[in-house]
Image (spheres, coloured by chain):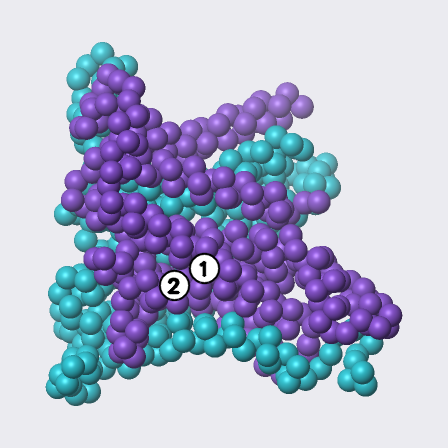
Amino acid sequence: MATTRILEWCGRFYIVLLLGFLYLPIIIMAAMSFNASPFYQLPFEWTTDWYASLWQNDQLIAATWNSIEIAVITTLISTVLGSMASLALYRYEFRGKKFLQALLFPPIAIPWLITGTAMLIFFFGVGIGRGLIAILLGHVALALPYVIVVVSARLQTFAPELEEAARSLGANQWQVTMRVTLPWIMPGVIAGGLFAFAVSFDQFVVSYFLSTPGQTTLPVEIYAAIRKGFTPEINAVSTIIIVVSMALMLLTARFFKFGGEK
Amino acid sequence: MADQLAIGSRSGLKPALPLLLPAYLWLTVAIFLPLSAMVFFSFMTDLPLAGKEWAFTLGNYAAFFSQSLYSTLLFASLRLGLEVTLWCVVIGYPAAYVLAKVLKGRSREAIFLLVILPFWSNGLVRIFSWAMVLREGGILDTALNAVLPFKINIDLMYSYPAVIIGLVHSYVPYMVLTCYLTLQAIDDSLIEAGRSLGASRRQVLRRVIIPLSMPGLIAGAALIFVPVVGSFMEPRILGGRTGTFYGTVIEDQLVAVFNWPLGAALSFILLAVVLIILALAAPVLRRAG
């Protein structure tokens, strides 16, 4: 069994290499946000100036607020609408249900480039135009399928007898939903909400097509800055974004098992 | 409640409708109508806005077929998608195997989380971090010159390999995730049975493990291939002038040239190609599942 052990250690070593590949650029990017040289020159000199100057950058701050606002509103709307739809898909049997479930996949599967292009053209055509409202419309639509899939997965573990029992004890439909079903699926709803927040907060492609100079989100603003030539200020914002996104992800993982094991 | 079924689920679209309608209306307005509108606009000479003259035309599609530039770029994008997908299989599958079959308990959980954590961070930011590493005088250049006794110049920035590296970095967690889920479902006793019946490690891998994990491989490949074919931000940032692909041309038509009907036609052609590829993959996936 000696070969097996050697192979296992090779496997562990390989995982470490992969983690290095995945994290090295991110760590370097974050480290450079604390480096004094505006041209990313080494040796490393510690500074927090770039974070301070970020604070003065009104354009970036406005874009950040837009991003947060849109992500929060997207989360609220898509979680409520998505949970309602999942509940209906779980509770009722009707013709065309399979079709409705299949309709959730195009928004996930079609490249965002195509969805974004289509939204830009359509919103312009019907007079919604570009801007924050258009971005919000798009983000909710992108987040909804994720919420429905996650909440439905949680509903699969729900025992319908519980609803029956509550109903036979005299609870009406609203009471059954709020007191029995909702508490049970809450972890799924929260995970779905965090998914929705991440989809919106990290969304670049669709926001890019739908934004106008005054009304943009943070990723769009970063893209513009990168193409103009980058400065450590972008590293500083990027570091903040990465920390926020990863914290959210860890939160999601707490509510929702990704590993698929109990 | 006479309409109640024994299992507790009830029939009829009527009671379900108020719960379903808001979500599906939203999807219709923001996804399905736009996609239909895109098809419609792709047959126009100009957008019907502000009283502009327009007519129906096949010219936008004719442009795709008459100018070899577009089809060349579409093939370049398909090739890019294929290469990135292959690299993700080569790098991601072994990692998924180690995660599913070698590591156990808490260390597996922790490392699994570490692997999929980056792909929850902003894709744009990750591509930007590679720009830090790959450019001349960047981290890779400085680090290698500090270690190696001779002077070398590493300037991968604005090259095809840079685009590949950035995209593989962005998408490899998908492959690890999907392969892990199928590999984990393989019963260990199947592998042991194969070994005890005299199969070599390689035979077990080829005859048992790879066939059983095929759905994960295909799902991962689809999840990677489709967005990579439509990518434009990664080639722009890491590829510079060599980073012209089909996606960047669509971006140009919409934000720089403002030829939206042509952009719509190019988008629709991409969508059709992607759907055909997914349709080809679907039966394989179903059979494997």
Q: Earlier in the sequence, mark 2 or mark 1?
A: 1
- Image x and y of residue B228, in percent: 34, 54
Chain letter, cyan: B
Give the CA separation, mark 2 to mark 1.
8 Å
Q: Chain of mark 1?
A: A
Kind of residue at badge 2: Leu
Disc 2 target residue: A136
User: For numbered disc 1, what is the local secondary structure?
Assistant: helix
- Image x and y of residue B114, in percent: 51, 35
Kind of residue at badge 1: Ile
Q: Please identify the quarter of the rendering in which residue A231 is found.
A: top left
Mark nearest the camera among 2 and 1 is 1
Q: Colour of chain A?
A: purple
Q: Please identify the quarter of the rendering in which residue A109 is found.
A: bottom left
User: For numbered disc 2, what is the local secondary structure?
Assistant: helix
Q: Please identify the quarter of the rendering in which residue B88 is found.
A: top left
